[in-house]
Amino acid sequence: HPNRARERAKGRGLDAATVRTPLVRCFPSRAFIRMPSPVVAYVIALSWHSSAFGMGSAPLHHAQRTRPLLRSRAAVRGCDGSEEPGDSLAREWSRYQNNTAMLESAVSAIVESELDPKRRALWEQLRRASEIEAVKVARETLEEDEDEQKPHWKTRSRALGELQYWLIATGNADAESALLDMVQKFYDSDRWVAVEADGHLRKAWTVHHDAGINLRMESARTLLRQGKARESADLFSQIASSCEPAWAEPHRWRAKVLNMAMHKPDDAMAAYDAALASSPRNYALMFEYGSFLCKDAAVEAALGGCRAAGSAERAARGAELLGRAAELNPLLREKVQQVLHPDEDDDFF
């Protein structure tokens, strides 16, 4: 309580008027849950937090609520690291934005848990409409006609980031299609757009919207670095079975462990097939799987072992996957050529 902090300050010989008490400790969090109406709790929380900083109680934009604006320390300091006039206000404003976003996230969780099924369905409809509109606007920004004035590169970059966000957050298929189209459309004109879209796609395919699942993935990779291949493969399998909807990344990592660490190529092929079924347009996965099939077929055909009989089929399947990957992403054409024709220097496509 603020009065208790001032009393302690007086006991230590400090000026109570200069004591700044963390306001978040004064907030009655338990009373939050006891409130009968989640909407009332939401409004009270916003008004309290806004008045604590001496600012208006207007809610932040949807994008700020969904993705808190994190301001780096370098953004509020000079080039030489010294503070500039107005730095304190900038830091306070940044802290206000971040704290408000985190508070709204907590309130949203409480509101969602207390809403009845009809209101929850309406809430989901509104969220879905916002998602569809954001993806549509981002795509239109990137697909402006060449006759018109082209958007600034920052505008295009933000549009690509918006598509990546919705692909990670909800697995939006339209966002994935838009990024794939940008890779193909700008390959011959504005190459940087294709390269950036390619990076956004690769990142979105390897990151899950649930932070807990990402932590479990990192734990499985840590086990692999420690030489515990079996434990790592089992953990990847558990993660894959717990993801709903299905996610390709744990299957892909399990296939890598089975192939490289445990030397079980047949089991690795099954894991790759499961990953490809979860993400059928993942050209990075296609390239990795196709390269594995081509190399495995070449090695087994040279050794002449028990798996040599199916080498031709695996090589054909690998070539098909590599061709499909190059079709989805023209940036992979040179790498596909190196895998299919390692001894040739002429262009493949």
Image: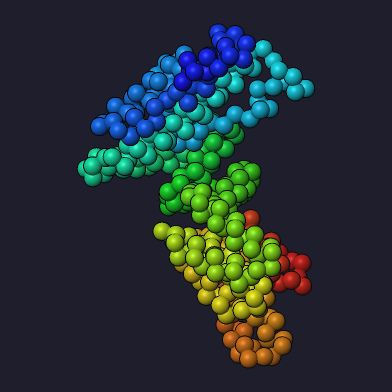
Front residue of this view, candidates 153 and 103: 103
Q: Please indicate, yes or no, whether residue 74 appears anywhere in the rendered image.
A: yes
Q: Please indicate, yes or no, whether residue 327 appears anywhere in the rendered image.
A: no
Front residue of this view, candidates 10 and 240: 10
Q: Is residue 248 found left or right of 263 in the rendered image?
A: left
Q: Is residue 157 found left or right of 40 in the rendered image?
A: right
Residue sitting at x 38%, y 20% = 47
Residue sitting at x 50%, y 62% = 239
Q: Quadrant of the C terminus?
A: bottom right
Residue 316 locus on image (x, y percent): 58, 78
Task: Say if 309 sits above or below 177 in the image.
Answer: below
Task: Say if 242 sits above or below 143 in the image.
Answer: below
Residue placed furthest toward the left: 118
Front residue of this view, candidates 241 and 317: 241
Number of dots carrying numbers: 0
Residue 163 locus on image (x, y percent): 49, 43
- The chosen color scheme is rainbow
Residue 121 locus on image (x, y percent): 26, 44
Residue sitting at x 53%, y 40% = 161
Task: Say if 106 sits above or below 314 in the image.
Answer: above
Residue 18 locus on image (x, y percent): 58, 10
Residue sitting at x 44%, y 51% = 171
Q: Is residue 135 found left or right of 77 in the rendered image?
A: left
Q: In which quarter of the image is residue 233?
A: bottom right
